[in-house]
Amino acid sequence: MKREFRATVWQEGDWIVAQCLQVDVASQGRTEREALKNLSEALELHFEEPRATITPHVTTVEAEIGAA
């Protein structure tokens, strides 16, 4: 199934960045065309069904937040 997305495109240094407006996905390329092609591929991967190679499990992780 194909679906259209809107994207903003801008230049950062030597790179052209393309960011999807509906989903938090972005990509880059040397040209606008390449950046949009890469964004399309990134969106396809984002919506691809995950395929676990090992049985998933739930665990905990600690992170120090706001450490001075």
Image (spheres, helix red, strand yellow):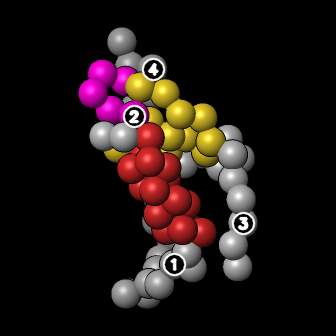
Image quadrant of residue 17? top left
Compare marks 1 and 2 and give the one earlier in the sequence.
Answer: 2
State the residue in front, 3 or 58. 3
Residue 30 lies left or right of residue 56; in this view the side is: left
Q: What kind of residue is marked 1?
A: Pro
SS for tag 3? loop
Q: Would you name the residue on which mark 1 appears?
A: 50
Instruction: Tell me the distance, in whole angstroms, between the alpha carbons under discs 1 and 2.
Output: 29 Å
Q: Is residue 59 above or below residue 68?
A: below
The N terminus, quarter of image? bottom right
Q: Earlier in the sequence, mark 3 or mark 4?
A: 3
Helix, strand or loop at mark 1: loop
What is the distance, in whole Å, between disc 4 and disc 1 at their CAs? 33 Å
Percent from the top left, x then y, of residue 37?
45, 56
- For the residues labelled 1 and 3, the Cα–Cα distance comes to 19 Å
> Which picture quadrant has residue 47?
bottom right
**Residue 56 in the image: above or below residue 62:** below
Residue named by callout 4: 66
Q: Residues within 10 Å of mark 1 (few under 14, many from 20)?
A: few
What's under tag 2, amino acid-wise? Ile
SS for dot 2: strand
- Going from N to C along the chain, the mark reached first, 2 or 4, is 2
Q: Is residue 37 magenta?
A: no
Q: Which residue is mark 3?
A: 3
Query: Which of 23/13 is in front?
Result: 13
Sequence-first disc among 4 and 1: 1
Q: Which residue occupies the foreground of this view, 56 or 46? A: 46
Query: Nearer the viewer's eye, disc 1 or disc 2?
Result: 2
Residue 28 in view in this figure? no
